[in-house]
Image (cartoon, rainbow, N blue to C red):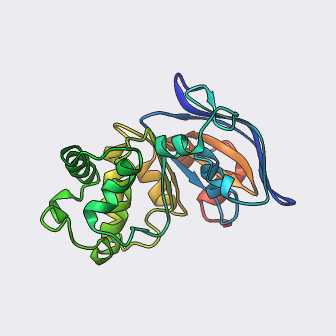
Amino acid sequence: MLSDPILITKNLNLWYGTNHALKDITMELPDKKTTAFIGPSGCGKSTLIRCFNRMNDLVDPCNITGSISYHGRELYGPDCDPVEIRMKIGMVFQKPNPFPKSIYENVAFGPRVHGIKDKCTLDQIVKESLTKAALWDEVCDRLSDSALGLSGGQQQRLCIARTLAVNPEIILMDEPCSALDPIATAKIEDLIDVLKQDYCVIIVTHSMSQASRVSDYTAFMYLGELIEYGETSQIFENPTVELTENYITGRFG
């Protein structure tokens, strides 16, 4: 049991129509740590993290039972606003998806939506967010340029900055390096190591080496079930479930 988990799931089940995609997921996720979800394609990793910021609300038909609490507050309770949740629990997707706007406007977009209009305040948020995303030094002299002119790795860091601009507590990353080259991947991994000092970072990855490098905790999923979850060193060096060991050692998947 974690001393102060930021997210807790209890007996979480999800169906897409008749497809039982998540089966009785119970786990606690720590704050200011990085948790990696690993497992073969289609095992439910992305589906699970999309539950954490209610992205599955946009999928029809989708039925969820069980509980997810965030700071003790039920995420699927009647008094919980999905827009507010998505501000506090941000998502970075597999493929960089900058808006067809300037670099500045990409980062300022979220704060503007949430009512911040003062230019000095927006300037400060943009600079702080790009700095935290390790991008400021590369783009500070071309903030008015189109974000679509950035490299893939820069676009992904811009998307991270866009997430940071609305002051989240949790950053969800769904295979954020799968479309990037090794150099850009290394920059994102270094960034994750810095971000976890201030945020809860949850990453889905197919790379065993990436999970072992960047995460403090690792969860192995298979066919919609949480097979094993614990500190990354234990999962990779001394897994307690044979299925986990078989996956990590490349015997299947």
The image quadrant of residue 229 is: top right
* Most foreground residue, 178 or 69: 69
Q: Determine whether, in the image, residue 112 is placed left or right of residue 215.
A: left
The image quadrant of residue 120 is: top left
The image quadrant of residue 160 is: bottom left
Q: Is residue 168 above or below residue 45?
A: above
Q: Is residue 212 above or below residue 152?
A: above
Residue most extreme to the top: 3
* Most foreground residue, 38 or 45: 45
The quadrant of the rendering that contains the C terminus is bottom right
Please name the residue shown 37% across and 64% down the image: 156
Where does residue 181 sit, x and y in percent of width and height?
Answer: 36, 74
* Most foreground residue, 233 or 115: 115
Q: Determine whether, in the image, residue 185 is placed left or right of residue 65.
A: left
Where does residue 99 sit, x and y in percent of width and height?
Answer: 39, 68
Q: Is residue 165 above or below residue 197?
A: below
Please name the residue shown 67% across and 54% down the image: 56
Residue most extreme to the left: 141
**Is residue 220 at least partly visible in the picture?**
yes
Please name the residue shown 69% across and 33% down the image: 77
Where does residue 41 sit, x and y in percent of width and height?
Answer: 66, 66
Q: Is residue 125 above or below residue 9?
A: below
Residue most extreme to the right: 18
**Is residue 216 at least partly visible in the picture?**
no
The quadrant of the rendering that contains the N terminus is top right
Give the total of numbered labels. 0
Where does residue 58 sit, x and y in percent of width and height?
Answer: 66, 57
